Image (cartoon, coloured by chain):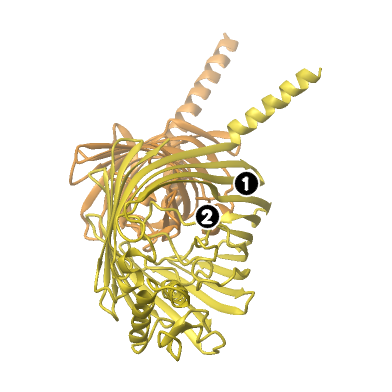
Chain colours: A yellow, B orange
Amino acid sequence: MAGEDSHTALAVIQKTLAEHFSWDLRILTYGIIQEPSNSSQNSENNFLQIPHYTADLEIRPDLRLNIDPLELSAKPRMRLEYSIWREGYRKGESEWDDDWYINEWLVRWKVRENLFISYGRENLQWGPSFLFSPSNPFFQDNGRRNPYLEVPGMDFGRLVWIPGSSWTISFIANTDEGRNKTASGFPIGFPQGTPFEKTFALKIDYTGRQNYGSIIFSHREDSLNSLGFFGGWTISDAILLYGEGVITQGSKALYPKRDSSPFGASMQKLHQDDSTIKPVLLIGGSYTFAASGTLSMEYAYYSPGYSDADPDTYYSLRRSAAGAISSSGLLSALGQKTLGQTASTGLRFLRKNYALFQYTQNNIKNKIDLTLRWTQNLNDGSGQFTAVVSYSLGNHVELFSVGTVMAGGKNTEFGSILDYQWMIGLKYSF
Amino acid sequence: MNRQHKKRDLILLVFTLVSCLGFFLPSLHAAMDPKEILRKADEARGNAEGVEWEIAIDSIEGGRQQQRTIRVTARGFNSLAEFLAPPNVKGQKLLMLDRNMWFAKPGLSKAVPISPRQKLVGGTANGDIASTNYAGDYKIVQTSEDMVSGEPCYLFDLSAVDNRATYDRIKYWISKERLVGLKAEFYTVSGKMFKTATFGYENSIMVDGKPREFISKMGITSAVMKEDVTTMSYRKASIKKVPDSVFNLNLLLK
């Protein structure tokens, strides 16, 4: 009798899984060749110790169980990496590394048809921009630079209420940095040494006939408040216009300041208690050609970025710190610390004015997807060219390539870390 | 003899009534408001409250063949298309909220806003996969009569009410007898025909407890490149009330 019961229960579970469970699996294998820039930030590659070659295997299953009103999802990941160094202290070294983790997971409960509560590790992204998403108080990386690398998830509790077809109100609590942290354990997007603080946000979305808009009020527990916003307008079949921005009071970012320290300057949180408003504004538009292909352009004004007077101090400090790390004792330690600060200033961009030009064409001859992107720092003249190409080799296999070339001197934003990077690989989808 | 006469008279009466009904039926349809005819034809290709279906798209463009299977949930001007096959596009999503469109891809961090001009696959416009609402999206400029494959049809000349509609102008042939659209020609603003479509209705759904013909196939042919053909086969169609949450970007699982 008990055997029959367990058999029946097993049959019910099997039926439930068959009807409500779904999964996808992607296996990526790729290699990266990159040339570290011999700049003062990473002289001879002794500070950042970037490997010249890496070979990776990633297994990415996506699992979903939808038993109305409950939805469960999980994205466990396995990554195996082999790295070889050709520059710096680790020249000639190689290393195997493996990483097993859950990048995202979610439990979502439908309380009513218009009310949802969820908790989980998510890559919570929004906004129409390509360059970056200033309205998002949680993530600095919007994942657009390289679509084959996943953005690490953070832990969120969310309540989503849909009072009408045009409106959505979300309460979002960011309770943990999850995987979105640096190797030294600090949250990405903040100066090194800044601890994680919970952030709470209220997001209100409106969708009209041919336009949409959102505002996001956020409060970080250490009193960093911001008002984010974005919106878009479908002007015609071919033209989209959009904007995105944020207004913050003060900044936790590090700014260079001349002083009596051994390097003649140091990185300091100059605007931590500042009550001045720091706006960030991005405007953009795209045009889709009749014969397919979409051209996008964006301009961003990033007011927290360094003013014209700051870069001289910043690069001079970097040079002094780079010269000190090969010495011994306290000076070397100070040099290491300073370079850590100049590398992670807590600013999304170093300067104030940026432009992006992008051309995308998908499904060329039913096989090729292409994105060409130029990002220009309008203040220091440096730039970054990225080409993302994928070629379909049937229904399961895709050959892809992401190439990035930097333009500008060693004392420029885009010329500081890498000269070029080329990623090439295969993606197998089940 | 009298009884035989009565029986004969009854048969004659029934025959006459049936004949009259057959004679008057097209007239009854003819007496219908053109807007009502268009609305009836729409019912065979969608539903205002909501519809969910799977569409197998086979496209030949420039001699190259491409297949996609998508599940579409649609209501009014909103629709969500989820790609089911082949594996390399599985999980991609196209969300259309009126004229606002977003495209989400597994692995891609956020949904990308796209313009209505960006094509789904082959000759299929994004609006083709959604529920049809010609009665709401287009105004009737002119009506006439014509034949399609020997079937008498009303021929509607439709013009977009506003820029929310997928096409600027459509010539639409609706069967007089079955009240379903059989053929359409799609025109640009300049009046140039750029594609044609034919429709098949081998599916059946229940409306008010009665079975009704429902779309099973739409074949699209480019007017410029005649060999560019896209066929959409509709299956697993179900009429159901679709809540707003289905079309909410905040709840879109990637």
The subunit carrying tag 2 is B
> Where in the figure is residue A46, as x and y percent of width and height?
36, 65
User: Callout 2 environment at 10 Å: few (<14), some (14 to 19), or many (20+)?
Assistant: many
In-image side of A124 versus A220 (left or right): left
Q: Can residue B7 be seen in this view?
A: yes
Q: Where is residue A114 in the image (x, y as percent from the top left)?
A: 64, 57
The residue that appears at 58% across and 78% down in the rendered structure is A224
Residue type at mark 1?
Glu
- The residue labelled by disc 2 is B247
Can the viewer see residue B244? no
Q: Is residue A417 above or below residue B126?
A: below
Q: Name the residue under label 1.
A: A71
The amino acid marked with disc number 2 is: Phe
Give the secondary structure at mark 2: helix
Disc 2 from disc 1: Cα separation: 16 Å
Does A213 sit left or right of A239 as displayed? right
- In-image side of A143 versus A358 (left or right): right
Give percent across and percent down for residue A416: 32, 70
Residue at left 29%, top 76%? A411
Q: Which of marks 2 and 1 is in front?
A: 1
